[in-house]
Every structure is written in structure tokens, then in C-alpha cells.
Amino acid sequence: MSDSVFASVVQAPEDPILGVTVAYNKDQSPVKLNLGVGAYRTEEGKPLVLNVVRKAEQMLVNDQSRVKEYLPITGLADFNKLSAKLIFGANSPAIQENRVTTVQCLSGTGSLRVGAEFLARHYHEKTIYIPQPTWGNHPKVFTLAGLSVKSYRYYDPSTRGLDFSGLLEDLGSAPSGAIVLLHACAHNPTGVDPTSDQWEQIRQLMRSKGLLPFFDSAYQGFASGNLDADAESIRLFVADGGECLAAQSYAKNMGLYGERVGALSIVCKTADVATRVESQLKLVIRPMFSNPPIHGASIVATILKDGDMYTEWSVELKAMADRIISMRQQLYDALCARGTPGDWSHIIKQIGMFTFTGLNTNQVAFMTKEYHIYMTSDGRISMAGLSSKTVPHLADAIHAAVTSAA
Ligand code: PGU
């Protein structure tokens, strides 16, 4: 038999985040714990389908008038309108003035990719600044889209907080017009967000230099439990009349991970520009995936357009956010009770799905080997994967890692 034409293809490494689940699935231990991927689990450690989502799906199934035709290239019109309203606010002048174009894309990742490809084709500055650190997929998505990626200082390991002066310095010396990726809330992986005052200073600096904001909003509602509060950073930038991009994901806040439902919005100066921008977005999408899937977007539209269902969703979302916050407190208390060396107050100060523990690669490897706890090697743990039952096991593992591992 002759050699494969692919014989020279080398084995690629597993993804740093999704690969953690692959390793976890292979582990036979009954105490194994997956704190890698940012996916919500119940107190019983099970994935959660929201009641309101089940209800919406039932309505869709029962509606005999629904068909499975292709959606337009830009996706479900209702979904797009409602998504823009969700992120920019019900009374957003930009929406009222028809200056926003919104296209349905494949969850947060696909929205970032479509936005980045549009910028690579039609925007004069090809450099995007991303925070250091950031979600591991950001540099790959933007590079493949044809942008050149640079980073700006964001996190200070010594304070486990925001390196605000580093951030201002780096954005201050970025070339005018450069694109800047901003996490709208619940920064991944650090759990550290700017305060409202700091956001305002960032806005002033960026607008004065003509830097173009590209918001990644993967956790609206997950940071504070309030959908409006978690969109404040974006609304601050839209309120000044300037332009920006926003990538929205419904993976976490509606628990629609595998449905791949998200949206890209581009806020423009005028309605006329927005129309032309949308015509070009269609040219990006058509050869990429032609048009987006119908089911997930229909679920979201059903929930967002009905007042009662929207309220039900906000209540379920708040319950998820609250459970994560209570996990922070429980883990912090458990470490204090064990007298684990070090200051662990960042666990309760950080925001959103993740705690950036400060544990190093060796300590993480130790916890995986000895305690069957799976997390990303940068020391990030998904608080949403934790429950009251598993907190003691995690606290034991961290205590042992800090006191005995290198
Ligand atoms: N942006 C940020 C900041 C994210 O954290 C994630 C997901 C996404 C975008 C993309 O989410 P979509 O599923 O495409 O809507 N990050 C999670 C999930 C696993 C992953 O890496 O995709 C995480 O654990 O970091």
C-alpha cells in the first residue's frame, strides 16, 4: 500500500481550553471535576437548559406554520433587531436613527470572525490591540481574519487587579485608528473589569485618538446578574455618537452553547453608511457559511419579544449569576478555614464566570494529577463548574498545591 498523501501531516496539540474537557472525559476517577471550559453547571454538576428555553422550544415545535427554509444571509430579522435592543438598550438613539446594522452569526466566535474579516477588507487600520491576557482564541480568530494582533497591558499579577496605567499608556501609544478589542464585562480569564470611571477614561482616550472599539460581549447578565448593568460599557461608547463593533453570544446567558447563536452589530455614523456596511457583511458571510442556522435564533427571538418570557429569562439568568457568586464566597471561606497561605480575596473580588487564581502551571498539573481537577494551565477556574459539594475537594487541592507543589 502506498503512503498516504497526508503522511507528512503532524499531530496538532489539543486546544488549551476545549482540550481540558477531552482530558477530563478520559479520566475514570469518581471525584474528577471539570473547571476548564466556561459552561454553567447546576449544584448537581449537570448542564442546565433554562425552563424558558424549553418553553420557547415547545412553542416552536407546536407551531405548524414554521418551516425549515434558508434564512437570509444576515439571519433572522427579528432576532437581529431584538439582539441590538438587548445590547444597546431599548431607547438607544443609534437604533432609532437606523445607524446600526446587526447580522446573525455563529455565536460569539463567528461574530468576532465576521467582524474581523469585514475590518480586514474595509477598514484602513489593520492592527487590533487585545488585552494581555485574553481569551485564547482571540489572537487566532483575528490573525486568520487578516488583522495584525498586538496587545495592551490589562492585568497586573502583583495586585491581581487592573493595570490601568499600563492600559492607558499602551492605548495612548497605539497608532491612531487602531482597533481595540474590549471585553464588555466579566473579562476572561481574569475576572477583572474596569470601574465606570475607568471606562469613561478609556472612552475619552480612545475617542480622542480615533481608536475603533470592538466589544466582545460573551457574558451579558453573567457578571452582575443584570442585563442592562452588564452592557453599560458598550452603551457609554454608543452614547457619544461614535462608531463601534459588538459581538454578542447567547452561549452563556441563555445556555445555548451548542446552538451557536450570536450577533455582530456595527454602529455607524449614519443610516446610509450602515446600509452599505451591511451589504459588505453579506459578502463576508455568504462564502463563509452562506447563512446562519434557524433554530437557536428562533428560541432567542421568541424569548426576547415576549415580556413574560423575557422576565422569566432574567430571573433564571440572575439565579445562575448568584450561584456563581455564592461559589466564590464558599471557596474563599474554605481556603480561609484551611489557613491556605496567601491572600485569596481576589476570589470574591473578581467578576463573572472565572477566577484567575494565580496558581502556576506546576500547581495546576499537580491538582490534575493528584486531585483529578481539570482547569486551564494559566490557573483559571470556571466557578460555574463548582458546587457546594465539590468546594471542599477543590479547597483541599489548592491547599496541597500551594503548600507542597513547586
Ligand atoms: N468571547 C469570550 C471572551 C469567551 O470567553 C468565549 C467563550 C467566546 C467569545 C466564544 O463563545 P461562543 O461559544 O463562540 O459564543 N469562552 C469559553 C468557552 C469555551 C471556548 O473557549 O470557546 C471559555 O471557556 O473561555
Image (cartoon, rainbow, N blue to C red):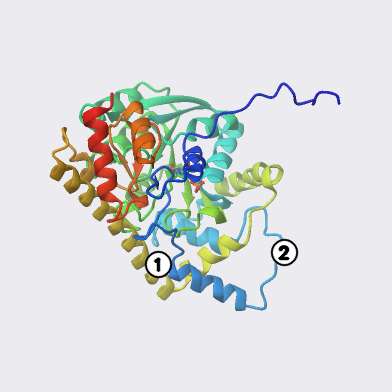
**Secondary structure under badge 1?**
helix
**Secondary structure under badge 2?**
loop
Say if residue 401 shows up in the picture: yes
Residue at left 18%, top 42%?
335
Q: Earlier in the sequence, mark 2 or mark 1?
A: 2
Query: What's the CA distance linking mark 2 and mark 1?
Result: 28 Å
Closer to the camera in the image, 115 or 337: 337
**Left or right: 105 as drawn, with respect to 399:** right
Q: Is residue 269 above or below residue 343?
A: below
Residue at left 37%, top 31%?
365
* Residue 69 marker: 2
**Left or right: 29 as drawn, with respect to 201:** right
Type of the residue with mark 2 = Glu
Closer to the camera in the image, 375 or 175: 375
Say if residue 270 shows up in the picture: no
Give the residue furthest to the right.
1
The image quadrant where one finds the N terminus is: top right
Residue 340, position as x, y percentages in the image? 17, 37
Q: Is residue 213 above or below residue 7?
A: below
Residue designated by label 1: 313
Q: Is residue 309 above or below residue 43?
A: below
* Residue 83 marker: none
Residue 208, position as x, y percentages in the image? 35, 31
**Left or right: 12 as drawn, with respect to 404:** right
Residue 214, position as x, y percentages in the image? 45, 39
Q: Depth-wise, is mark 2 or mark 1 nearer the camera?
A: 1
Type of the residue with mark 1 = Trp
Residue at left 59%, top 30%?
144
Residue at left 55%, top 70%?
57
Residue 356, position as x, y percentages in the image? 30, 37
